[in-house]
Image: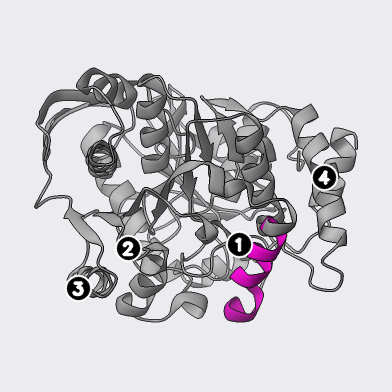
Amino acid sequence: MTYPEALEYLYSFVNHEKEDGYDYKKSFRLDRMRRLAAILGDPQKSINSVHIAGTKGKGSTSAIVASILQNAGFRTGLYTSPHLVSVRERIRIDGSLISEDDLARLAGILKSAVGEMKDDIPSFFEVYTALAFMYFKEKKIDFAVYEVGLGGRLDATNIIEALVSAITPISYEHMDKLGTTLRKIASEKAGILKEGGVCIMAPQEKEAESTIEDICNKRNVRLIRIGRDIKFKEISTGDTRQVFDVSGLCGDYLSLETSLLGYHQVVNAATAVGIIEALRFRNVPVKDDSIREGIRCARWEGRLEIIRKDPFVILDGAQNKASANALAQAIKRLFKYKRLILVLGVCKDKDIEGILEELLPISDPVVLTKSNIAERAMEPSKIREHIRRKDKTVVLTASVKEAMEKASAIAMPDDIILATGSLFVVGEIKEAMAGREYVQK
């Protein structure tokens, strides 16, 4: 296959990330994923791995862990989702994206394997996860860090046997699929925990925490709690970096620095330290200097990402009430500004009321938009119906490119343009800011 042919083939599979309304328990099946992996020779079994689930921060935490392992001298794979601009972003080794040639070649192998499955056709995420397994095995990496796509228990990544698993903060999301209570959602997320394993748990709401504890007890999983077993303390913060201390099980790590902004990123970094310490229990040698440098070097796009100044243009993928709250608190703490122009686009299955509850109080004009690639994107007119405050100027747009043009036209140098609500929107804005129309690639 050529690279364009590979993309056409991969995007021919049903993509639940964009699809509107599907049956989670019928659509997500580990037996199908195991069958596909078996046809390919179970490449995932030859790789030491870390597995990370959660609602908030699982992508950032995965990126920090991968950065630390890379700085420790390990050849490290990172598998995340969704992507912002290019599907190649989902699969990286030592920070480098999978090449177009490698992706195309492996897609050809996948096509043959999928052909053996006859009428039991996998989804886009299942096929792409299998491609990551193959790529990591072929490149003989030392470690792979896998971010769960959705949920955990039925996620395609859950056929791995991880050395360490982690659960980042859990909040209400995908309630039509994962459940309407934190207990049900946490149970799905904790489905990645295997018998006799190790779990690093970020700070949780009480209901989620007790659920994870119960599952750890039933499965004989060693539970390490961030904030209790591993403590952290923010020292200073600004609009370019944060400094913090972590007191771990293996020692103290003082004056750690990260360019990932927001208090929640300190939590994510502390969780990453916990994961690395747990790997040390598995006789994986990682020096303190590697932890320090890995955290300092870690980058993760689309999370409180500043892409322009005067005025500030900030992108963030917050897509539920808890993430929007963390974003609002970070904006208020880190930036000085006159007005905040909110560019907002969300998907239909998100808590639009909760997101607006957190973001409207810090916003002045509001520019509503929608992703042009997600079927489940909510129409701006429907979002408008949820904005009941009469003191807000609300502008409706048909595309993220138009939304950014409208926001830029009214922004002054001492304002902030904050674009959020969906990583699909963030990705399209990054393309629009580069002067290109968004295309899948």
Compared to residue 366, the image places residue 307 above or below, namely above
Q: Amino acid at mark 3?
A: Ser
- Residue 440 percent across, percent down from the top left: 76, 43
Assess disc 3: are there few (<14), some (14-19) or many (≥20) residues with their C-alpha within 10 Å of its C-alpha: some
Marks 4 and 2, Cα distance to the nearest angstrom? 37 Å
219 left or right of 151? left
Looking at the rendering, the stretch of residues picked out in magenta corresponds to: 23-37
Marks 1 and 4, Cα distance to the nearest angstrom? 42 Å
The quadrant in which residue 213 appears is: bottom left
For mark 4, what is the residue? Answer: 109
Q: Amino acid at mark 1?
A: Pro
Looking at the image, which residue is at 82% across and 66% down? 117
- Residue 124 percent across, percent down from the top left: 72, 57
Asked if the residue under mark 4 is in contact with the one under mark 3, i.e. CB atoms within 8 Å, the reply is no
Q: Amino acid at mark 2?
A: Ile
Looking at the image, which residue is at 31% across and 57% down? 197
Marked residue nearer the N-terminal end (1 or 2): 2
Considering the whole magenta stretch, tell me its main secondary structure: helix
Compared to residue 57, the image places residue 390 above or below, namely below
Q: Secondary structure at mark 4?
A: helix
Residue 387 in sight in this render? no
39 left or right of 115? left
Indicate whether residue 237 is drawn in magenta. no
For mark 3, what is the residue? Answer: 210
Label disc, if present, on residue 170 of the rendered structure: 2
Q: Secondary structure at mark 3?
A: helix
Mark 1 vs mark 4: in front? 4
Marks 1 and 2, Cα distance to the nearest angstrom? 28 Å
Label disc, if present, on residue 380 of the rendered structure: 1
Mark 1 vs mark 3: in front? 3
Marked residue nearer the N-terminal end (3 or 2): 2
Asked if the residue under mark 4 is in contact with the one under mark 1, i.e. CB atoms within 8 Å, the reply is no
